[in-house]
Amino acid sequence: MRSEAVRRVQSGSPWEESFGFARAVAAGDRVIVAGTTAFKGDMLYGEGDPYEQTKVAFGTAVEAIGEFGLDITSVVRTRVYLAHSRDVEAVGRAHKELFDAVRPATTLLVVEGFIDSRVLVSVELEAFGGQ
């Protein structure tokens, strides 16, 4: 039986449909946002620019939690996946600009690569809507 306490949001990414996943899932007061890149539809924003890709990807992720009435101040955890360790400084700068006042728990990982080789950054976040 499906619980009404679990709600899902789609963002229109073509991968959501082909892979069968939601951009964000709320389970009670907790909202989890799936891996998010700087793609919006078929367009990649910030191609070649890890700073810009980070800002766009987190912007999309924060929009997703907005569907549940939350905002950036509700973010308690972020995960950042990088294609190249050389991009740590640029990505860290973007993360600090967005989350400095919030200070979520954060993990930064360098991975082998992404589905599309132009993607330099993928992000996830978790938010909490309880008191």
Image (tube, grey):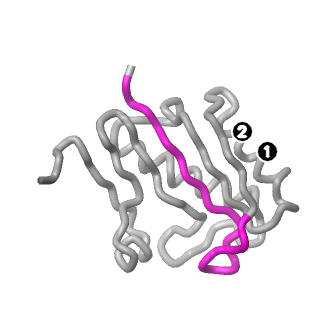
Quick one: SS at disc 1?
A: helix
Q: Label 1 amino acid?
A: Arg
Characterize the magenta stretch by its predominant secondary structure.
Answer: loop
- Residue 10, horizontal then vertical, whole percent: 34, 61
The residue positioned farthest toward the front in the image shown: 1
Which quarter shows the C terminus?
top left
- Between residues 34 and 53, which one lies in front from this camera angle? 34
Kind of residue indicated by mark 2: Glu
The picture places residue 35, in percent across and down from the top left corner, at 53, 60
* Residue located 63% across and 35% down the image: 105
Residue 22, given in percent of the width and then of the height, sits at 36, 61
Residue at x 62%, y 61% (from the top left corner): 122
Q: Is residue 28 above or below residue 37?
A: above
| Label 2 neighbour load within 10 Å: few <14, some 14-19, many 20+ | few
Is residue 115 in the magenta section?
yes
Label 2, label 1: how many angstroms apart (C-alpha)? 6 Å
Which residue range is magenta in the image? 111-130
* Residue 111 position (above or below residue 43): above
Q: Secondary structure at mark 2?
A: helix
Tell me if 35 is positioned left or right of 7 in this view. right
The reply, left or right, for residue 101 in relation to residue 34 is right
Mark 1, other Cα within 10 Å: few <14 / some 14–19 / many ≥20: some
- Cβ atoms under marks 2 and 1 closer than 8 Å: yes
> Label 1 belongs to which residue?
93
Residue 63 image offset from top left, x and y in percent: 45, 48
Give the residue at mark 2. 97
Residue 66 located left or right of residue 4: right
